[in-house]
Amino acid sequence: MNTASAPMTDETSLSARETVKALYTYVRPHRWAVALGLLCALVGAAGGLLQPLVTKTLVDRLATGETIAGILIALTAVVVLGTAVEAYGAYVLERTAESVVLAARRTLVGRLLRLRIAEWERISPGDLMSRVTSDTTLLRAVSTQAVVAAASGAVALVAAIVMMAFLDVVLLSVTLGVVVLVGGAAALMMPKIARATERSQQAVGEISTALERAFGAFRTVKASGAEERETARVDAAARRAWRHGVTSAKWESVAGSADELAVQLAFLAVLAVGGVRVASGEIPVSTLIAFLLYLFYLIEPVAKLVDAVSHYQEGAAAISRIAHVECLSTEPLARQTDAVPRQRATVPGPASVRFEDVSFRYRPGLPSTHQQVSFEVPGAGMTAFVGPSGAGKSTVFALIQRFYEATGGRILVDGKDVRDWSLPELRSAIGYVEQDAPVLAGTLRENLVFATPGATDDDIRDVLARTKLDTLVERLYHGLDTPVGHRGSQLSGGERQRVAIARALLRRPRLLLLDEATSQLDAVNELALRDVVAELARETTVLVAAHRLSTVTGADRIVVMETGRVRSVGTHEELVAQDRLYAQLAATQLLTPAR
């Protein structure tokens, strides 16, 4: 099967209500910490609100010659206390923001690792990784800082306006007129920030996709002399991210300076109108001074509100991308009752397998991979699947493990439809060796016990000897604890294949699936493994998909497949005599004379 990974281009942005709802799900577990941060921010803001009034009192006392020492000491104490409380609140918010990001990443990773294979093949891994890394990082600002900044900014703004109204309603009217005019213009820029941020995040996902593509075939890239072309591919995505990031920064800088512009223009207007009112005796000069201080105080709460909206626009793009992961199809979570057997002795004997008129296609619109496939494997022994490439051999194994769901017919394991099995119980009974025999980064021991964490040293030594990996372990400097490199880069192809086989054998499965498991082995190791499989087949059901017929001539039954159908079933001798396709395959591989 050959499916191409692609970014999730069919997404639509969430509405404002959906975005707020999604954001609340992340903030809700930390709502009391956010409330504490908000309270601390308000306490700090309260100290700032008192200063203009205290200044007015100071000016009035200076005019009458009264002492001002007590007021200065009290004001200093309030300022210091407010600053300390505000700093503690900022720490609480930063800690809470990190907790929100951690929770989001854990949720995403848990979901991504449960994706159905069909979803995983449809989407670029690099794009998914960018959602776990860069997109969740944007949650840090919007989930706590933006929420608190919006709330504290709004409260401080309202409180300042009340104080300004108490001082002089005329000057307040002038101030609000200027602020509303400039603020309205700044609000028009917010959708532009949102669009630019979302496009920038998509481009970051494309960078991850391009890097994952190159690193996933690193030797091929070098052997093909394609370093410059792959660098250009990543560079193009990086330039797109830069271009959209610059666009977002441009509008953010304009919006961010709008608050200062509004206050400066309001200051000039208030200074003009206030000067006239002081000259006419309508208000004392101390009132004008206090009002101007409140005017400059407005810079902070207005800036907080503008920042909160900007952060929200940035975060909304990230939340939308993260939320779409929730729409991807996943396998069900394991239940407590789905206990996985740990020891071979606690489970019954070999599993039986039966396909009844099974049909399957990978996606609507694609040709059928299976068409009314039927065969039966009663238990113990080896059954081989042979046929040309694309005949549907590997798909048999994928359907048995429910990597995909059949579109027609039934698949039975031990007489029970696989759809009625819990996935952990079904897969715990199966040992699976994939065609490309993947080896994970880590030590050799970690790879061997990957499917059986509770394996003993005796179990490991046994499978090492059976797969002839014991000599490899002896020559490794750190033995089983030697790192094997990224994707097993420190091992040869044949060694990686034997590690994958040993990993499956260590599980002591009731059903062993070998998909081209000997394709990279030399003749000596292939013969040795063939003997191991023959021994296993006495007590385990073994299914083998193979192109090399030399590995399966001794199978109890051979299923010949062609274009998604079962062509014939029999032993090697029977099929050579009765099936022309099988006879041709055997002759091509020099197993029989050409006829």
Image (spheres, grey):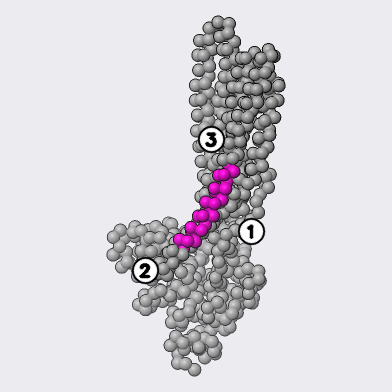
5 displayed left or right of 588 = right
Q: CA distance from mark 2 to mark 3?
A: 51 Å
Q: Which mark is residue 511?
A: none
Instruction: Please tell me which residue is depicted at 53% across the width and 28% down the height of the picture.
Output: 86
Q: CA distance from mark 3 to mark 1?
A: 35 Å
Q: Secondary structure at mark 1?
A: loop
Measured as percent of width and height from the top left, residue 62 is found at 56, 9
Q: Amino acid at mark 2?
A: Ser
Q: Residue furthest top?
A: 65
The answer to which quarter of the image holds residue 361 is bottom right
Magenta residue check for 249: yes
182 displayed left or right of 338 = right
| Residue located beneath label 2 in the image | 492
Measured as percent of width and height from the top left, residue 183 is found at 66, 35
| Residue placed most toward the observer, 144 or 527 | 144
Rendered-image quadrant of the N terminus: bottom right
Q: Is residue 353 visible?
A: yes
Give the label, 1 or 2, closer to the camera. Answer: 1
| Residue located beneath label 3 in the image | 93
Instruction: Name the main secondary structure of what is drawn in magenta.
Output: helix
Q: Secondary structure at mark 3?
A: helix
| Rendered position, 404 above or below 176 | below
Q: Amino acid at mark 3?
A: Leu
Q: Are marks 3 and 1 in contact (CB under 8 Å)?
A: no
Q: CA distance from mark 1 to mark 2?
A: 41 Å
Q: Amino acid at mark 1?
A: Asp
Measured as percent of width and height from the top left, residue 413 is found at 57, 69
Report the magenta residues as a range.
230-252
Instruction: Please tell me which residue is depicted at 62% across the width and 14% down the height of the picture.
Output: 285
Measured as percent of width and height from the top left, residue 328 is found at 61, 57
| Residue located beneath label 1 in the image | 10
